[in-house]
């Protein structure tokens, strides 16, 4: 967990993520990334230079097999206020609309429900569990399927909600989070979505793993490229 906390400390300092008096709600799906973030933020709260409040918010999509009790018990153990938002997102997407490519709409609806709840409890920031590998995958998704260069940002201001979205794990690798989950016996919740592991993102993840086998330093170099605004050399600079 020292590596995780060190990565959070660095990201917070480099991207000015947390200020004195912030009220930060962690978006918790129950997956490894969000659960690792929740645990790490609770530990970081103890020595953060800027004091902040912490809570956890889960948006339930309405799948019958989704069990939020695991998250609730974890929050009770660590004295973290917990909020569960029940929605009909799954029914709308898979039954009513019968979406063939549901991920984009689903993500938009889940974000909306999450942001509404965060505002309802009077919090000003939402922390998400995206990490460095997510940022790299998003970059390649954007280039290959949208014809543009775009990726996740460490800090985003949501003007329509007057809310900040922060990603404290952005400088950390997925493997580091998996290790922390295993070492500290952090519980996770099975993802009941039928699209889990069957998405374009998963295809990009597999492609990148093949690239890293040929170029072992590839992950670090791509991440450096994302952060290297001084050497951003594309055609519109002509």
Image (cartoon, grey):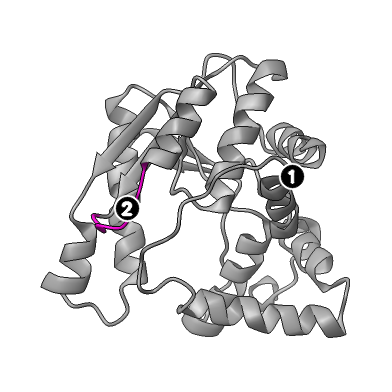
Visible in this render: residue 25? no
Q: Residue 237, image x and y in percent?
A: 69, 71
- Residue located 44% across and 71% down the image: 196
Tag 2, which secondary structure?
helix
Residue at the disc numbered 1:
183
Residue 46 bears which disc, if any? none
Residue at the disc numbered 2:
110
Q: Is residue 141 above or below residue 165?
A: below
Separation of marks 1 and 2 at Cα, in angstroms: 30 Å
**Magenta residues, as a range?**
62-68
- Residue located 34% across and 40% down the image: 115
Q: Mark 2 or mark 1, which is nearer the start of the sequence?
A: 2
Tag 1, which secondary structure?
helix
- Residue located 74% across and 41% down the image: 4
Q: Quadrant of residue 13?
A: top right
Q: Around disc 2, counting alpha carbons within 10 Å, would you say few (fewer than 14), some (14 to 19), or many (20 or more)? A: some
State which mark lies toward you, 1 or 2.
Answer: 1
Visible in this render: residue 156? yes
């Amino acid at each position: 967990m020292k590596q995780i906390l060190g990565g959070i400390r660095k990201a917070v300092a480099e991207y000015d993520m947390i200020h004195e008096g912030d009220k930060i709600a962690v978006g918790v799906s129950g997956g490894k990334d969000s659960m690792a973030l929740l645990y790490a933020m609770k530990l970081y709260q103890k020595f953060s230079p800027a004091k902040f409040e912490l809570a956890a918010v889960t948006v339930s999509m309405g799948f019958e097999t989704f069990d939020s009790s695991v998250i609730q018990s974890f929050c009770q153990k660590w004295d973290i206020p917990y909020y569960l938002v029940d929605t009909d997102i799954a029914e709308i997407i898979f039954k009513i609309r019968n979406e063939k490519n549901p991920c984009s709409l689903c993500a938009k609806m889940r974000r909306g429900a999450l942001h509404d709840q965060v505002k309802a409890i009077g919090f000003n920031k939402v922390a998400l569990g995206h990490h460095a590998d997510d940022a790299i995958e998003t970059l390649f998704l954007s280039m290959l399927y949208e014809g543009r260069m775009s990726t996740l940002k460490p800090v985003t201001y949501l003007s329509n909600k007057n809310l900040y979205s922060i990603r404290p794990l952005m400088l950390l690798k997925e493997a580091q989070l998996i290790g922390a989950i295993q070492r500290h016996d952090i519980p996770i919740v099975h993802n009941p979505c039928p699209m889990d592991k069957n998405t374009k993102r998963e295809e990009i993840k597999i492609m990148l793993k093949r690239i890293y086998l040929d170029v072992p330093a590839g992950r670090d170099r791509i991440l450096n490229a994302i952060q290297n605004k001084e050497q951003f050399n594309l055609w519109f600079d002509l």
